[in-house]
Image: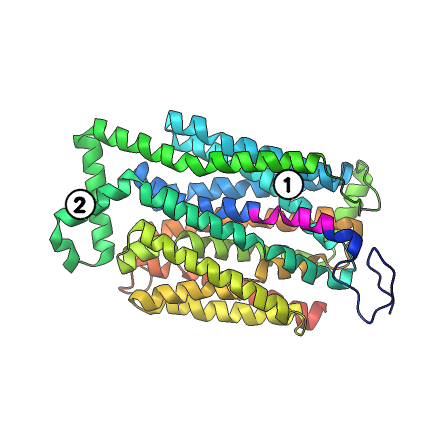
Amino acid sequence: MADASVGDGQDSSKPKILTRDMIAPFILVTLLFPLWGFANDVTNPLVRAFKDIFLISNAQSSMVQFAFYLGYGIMAIPAAIFIRSYSYKAGILLGLGLYAIGASLFIPASLYQEFNFFLIALFVLTTGLALLETTANPYILSMGHQDTATRRLNFAQAFNPMGALTGIYIAKTVILSQLEVEKFRQEERAANPEYETMLPSVVDGKLTESLQQLSVNDPVAHQAMVAADLITVRGPYIAIAIVVAVLFLVFLFSKLPKTMTHDKPLTRKELKETFGRLFRNKRYLEGVIAQAFYVGAQIMCWTFIIHYGMAIVGLTAAQAQSYNLIAMTVFLSSRFICTFLLGYIQPGQLLYVLAAGGMSCVLGTIFLDGMAGLYSLIAISACMSLMFPTIYGIALKGMGDDASLASAGLVMAIVGGALMPLLQGAMIDGSSIIGSIPSVKTSFLLPFLCFVVIAIYGFRAHRVHN
């Protein structure tokens, strides 16, 4: 058949993933994908860090994820309308601008030492991320034949974990290992050798009590500790603000191809018709639901790996973050392998197989003890590696110009990452729901339920919607 991709027009048995004229813009837009990977994973450890710095509960510290992912839920639809009214390039520029502003707001937040100010900064930052994801994903899909769109997006998404790995490493070496509050915990552990004979979950509680006593008995020393730690936290965000500002200038002066057949303001009638088509598309609607549950599972598994390592295995925060780095390395390796497998296996079929694997690993996380449970938690990342872009590609297949608004629904589904960590944090604060198994472990029943939903969507995508 003739190659229907934009470009050289040569005959080939299969449509190409990319044609020559799209290689340069593809590379440029793919540079954006590590940006939200970095932001996600340098922020995840703040849930535990802020719990100790501000002496708040797990549920309260999980507001970090609520603020971070709420930006996606609020901004996704307006972002899509903006893109349709202007262009993909305009969406990228506005997204980069909001990203840089949000990261810069960490400076006043650290000076005022207010937890809520950090939440505002994260919210602004993620309105920018919502614009970037709403723009970059459909833009990549549009850079060639629709039959190769999912593989093209998977390839671009494969670079997202590179930013994530960088974020995890920075969080471990620049933030967690440098926190004064973590040094205090280690000093308390050394001063109380009897802790070595106690369960890690009990020791973790006693160390938190010691921090609370310090804030009451020596508020000046505790305030100095908080000030130093917040300066440590803001460092990586100032650095990424500078990087994003440079990228803004690169895109500002770059020429990008227009792949939408039109870019004009949407009328109310056009919006109504577009949303009508989307709401009638079961494959798309179910994809939005599956995406919300996937993002919730991903954020829970990566956010609370530190809690798991500290409370169940007895690791320090920095040591636990090292296992987050291993999990992301597994995720990255598996993504390239699964992208290759997509050349031979239908996306829906691969999706439900991966979801079944995720359920098995979650059961190991809950019911296996010590390091075996932690390794099971790490193994979940291999199963999650290709879920986001695969759900995305299945749901948006054949959307045409509707892809920008349809993409917004899938990006809005990222709000699952705002809601579900709050629930898991509350479960960790509460008592166990399975006998004597610690609540940190039993809280992973939530990711298990998420994978059940994803498996059902993968099955339906392969057997029904296909």
Badge 1 local density, few (<14 within 10 Å), some, or many (20+)? many
- Main secondary structure along the magenta-highlighted residues: helix
Is residue 276 at least partly visible in the picture? no
Is residue 397 at least partly visible in the picture? yes
The type of residue carrying mark 1 is Leu
**353 left or right, relative to 377:** right
The type of residue carrying mark 2 is Glu
Residue at left offset 21%, top offset 43%? 209
Residue at left offset 82%, top offset 59%? 5
Residue at left offset 64%, top offset 35%? 248
Q: Is residue 28 above or below residue 328?
A: above
Residue under label 1: 131
**Range covered by the magenta-colored residues:** 24-34
Across and down, in percent, residue 133 comes to 63, 46
The magenta stretch spans residue 237: no
Across and down, in percent, residue 391 comes to 63, 60
Across and down, in percent, residue 123 comes to 52, 36
Q: Nearer the viewer, residue 107 or 20?
A: 20
Q: Is residue 18 above or below residue 251?
A: below
Real-space CA distance between mark 2 and mark 1, rounded to the nearest whole angstrom:
45 Å
Choose the circle earlier in sequence order: 2 or 1. Answer: 1
Of badges 2 and 1, the one in the foreground is 2
**146 left or right, relative to 53:** right
